[in-house]
Amino acid sequence: MVRLKPGDRVNCRLKEGEIVGAYKEHDETKTFEIVAVGDYGYYLHVPVYYSIKNTISIDRYRLKKMDIDGRFLNEEMIHINENMVCQIVHKVDGMPCSICKEFSPMAEANQEDGTFTCWSCRQNPYH
Ligand SMILES: [Zn+2]
């Protein structure tokens, strides 16, 4: 399997609120974003409304130590093994800013019309 990186999205299967192996009996499939890569698997962001058991909170210490993006501070994550990835949803490779046209790696659409506006253009559209 290809090595995934933070920002990539994967589908995992769930049985009674726990992530199970990709080929196990399951109740539902959910999409998760990878926040960090471990030696034997991945750490996935768990939105609170997913109500999944055994999550780990992303505090300042873990955020720094594991090099997790700042937007996940105080969110929850869970560790999975590589064989629990059921499907890779899509690879994020970045987008150009719709205003200044500068390409930002890892960027995703952040405007209602599906385009991306970079941080500096959002702070000051006339820079
Ligand atoms: Zn811009």
Image (cartoon, rainbow, N blue to C red):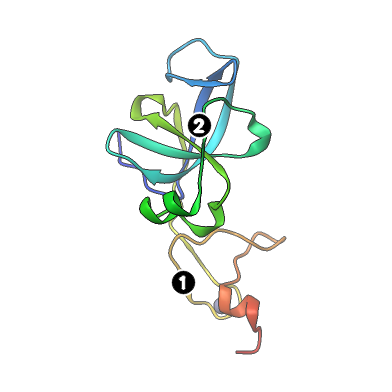
Q: Which mark is residue 62?
A: none
Quadrant of residue 17 within the rendered picture = top right
Residue at the (42%, 19%) spot, across then down: 21
- Percent across and percent down for residue 125 are 66, 83
Residue on which disc 2 sits:
11
Say whether mark 1 is within 8 Å of ligand 1.
no
Indicate the quadrant containing the N terminus: top left, top right, bottom left or bottom right. Answer: top left
Where is the C terminus found, in terms of image quarters? Answer: bottom right
- Camera-side residue of 96 and 66: 66
Label 2 neighbour load within 10 Å: few <14, some 14-19, many 20+: some
Figure check: 2 above or below 119: above
Residue, disc 1: 103
Image depth: mark 1 or mark 2 in front:
2
Q: Nearer the viewer, residue 102 or 123?
A: 123
Horizontal side of 1 relative to 32 (left or right) equals left
With respect to residue 51, does 5 lie above or below? below
Asked whether 116 or 120 is in front, the reply is 120
